[in-house]
C-alpha cells in the first residue's frame, strides 16, 4: 500500500509540475501581450524619416541626375515627402481607430436595418471623397513630374518608371513598397505602403 501511495504521489507530482509551468508561461505571455499592445508597433518616426530620406537618395542615385535635372527634381521630391507625411498621418489615424475598436470590442449594440443602410451610404460617400482626393493628388504629382520627365534621357526614363511610377498612385497601386527588391505590390502582393 505504501508503494502504491508513493507511486501515486510521484505520478501526481510529475503531472502537476508541467501544468504549473504552462499556466505560469500563459500568465507571463498574457502580461507581455498586454504590454506589447500598449507599445507602438512599427518603426519609430526617426527611423521612418531615415528610410524616407534613403528612398529619395536611392531615386536620385538611380536616375543619375544632372545639376539641371536636380533643380527639376526638387518639386517632385516635395510631393514625395508630402505623400510620406500624409501616409504617416493616415497610419496614425488608422491605429487610433483600431485601438478604439479593440476597446469597444464586444460592446457593439444591434443596429437596425435603416441605420445599417445609412452607415453603408456614409461609408460609400466617404470612399468616393477619398477617391476624388487621390485622383487630385495623382494629377498634381503628374504636373510636377512632367518637366523632370521631359528632361530625362531614354535610359533615365526607363529607370524613372521603376523608381517614380508608384509615387503618383495611391497605396493600392501596381507597385508596392518592395519594388526595389524585386517584389510585387498592390492588390495581389498585399504590399501596401
Image (tube, rainbow, N blue to C red):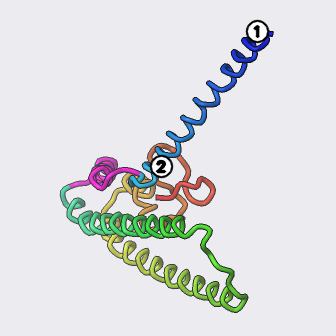
User: Which badge, 2 or 1, is on the more N-terminal residue?
Assistant: 1
Number of the front mark, 2 or 1: 1
Q: What residue is at 40 percent from the left and 59 percent from the top?
A: 164
Residue 59 located within the stretch drawn in magenta: yes
**Res 111 → quadrant:** bottom right
List the residue tagged with mark 1.
2
Q: Is 147 in front, or is 188?
A: 188
Q: Check disc 2 and report its element: helix, strand or loop.
A: loop
Q: Where is residue 180 in the image (x, y as percent from the top left)?
A: 44, 46
Residue 63 located within the stretch drawn in magenta: yes
The residue stretch that appears in magenta? 42-66
Q: Is 146 in front, or is 79?
A: 79
Q: Residue 178 carries which label?
A: 2
**Secondary structure, magenta segment, majority class:** helix
- Please give left or right for residue 59 compared with residue 184 in the image: left
**Res 70 → quadrant:** bottom left
Circle 2 packing at 10 Å, graded few (<14), some (14-19), many (20+), is some
**Quadrant of the rendering where the N terminus is positioned:** top right
Q: Check disc 1 and report its element: helix, strand or loop.
A: helix
Q: What is the distance, in whole Å, between disc 2 and disc 1 at their CAs?
A: 69 Å
Q: Where is residue 168 in the image (x, y as percent from the top left)?
A: 43, 68
- Please give left or right for residue 101 compared with residue 42 in the image: right
Amino acid at each position: 500500500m505504501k508503494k502504491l501511495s508513493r507511486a501515486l504521489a510521484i505520478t501526481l507530482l510529475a503531472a502537476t509540475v508541467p501544468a504549473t509551468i504552462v499556466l505560469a508561461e500563459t500568465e507571463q505571455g498574457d502580461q507581455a501581450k498586454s504590454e506589447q499592445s500598449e507599445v507602438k508597433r512599427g518603426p519609430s518616426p526617426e527611423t521612418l524619416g531615415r528610410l524616407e530620406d534613403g528612398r529619395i537618395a536611392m531615386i536620385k542615385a538611380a536616375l543619375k541626375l544632372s545639376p539641371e535635372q536636380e533643380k527639376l527634381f526638387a518639386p517632385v521630391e516635395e510631393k514625395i515627402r508630402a505623400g510620406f507625411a500624409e501616409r504617416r498621418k493616415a497610419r496614425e489615424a488608422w491605429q487610433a481607430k483600431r485601438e478604439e475598436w479593440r476597446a469597444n470590442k464586444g460592446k457593439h449594440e444591434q443596429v437596425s436595418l435603416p441605420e445599417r443602410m445609412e452607415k453603408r451610404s456614409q461609408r460609400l460617400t466617404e470612399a468616393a471623397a477619398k477617391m476624388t482626393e487621390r485622383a487630385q493628388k495623382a494629377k498634381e504629382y503628374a504636373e510636377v513630374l512632367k518637366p523632370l520627365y521631359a528632361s530625362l534621357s531614354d535610359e533615365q526614363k526607363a529607370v524613372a518608371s521603376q523608381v517614380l511610377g508608384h509615387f503618383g498612385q495611391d497605396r493600392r497601386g501596381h507597385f508596392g513598397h518592395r519594388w526595389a527588391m524585386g517584389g510585387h505590390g498592390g492588390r495581389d502582393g498585399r504590399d501596401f505602403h
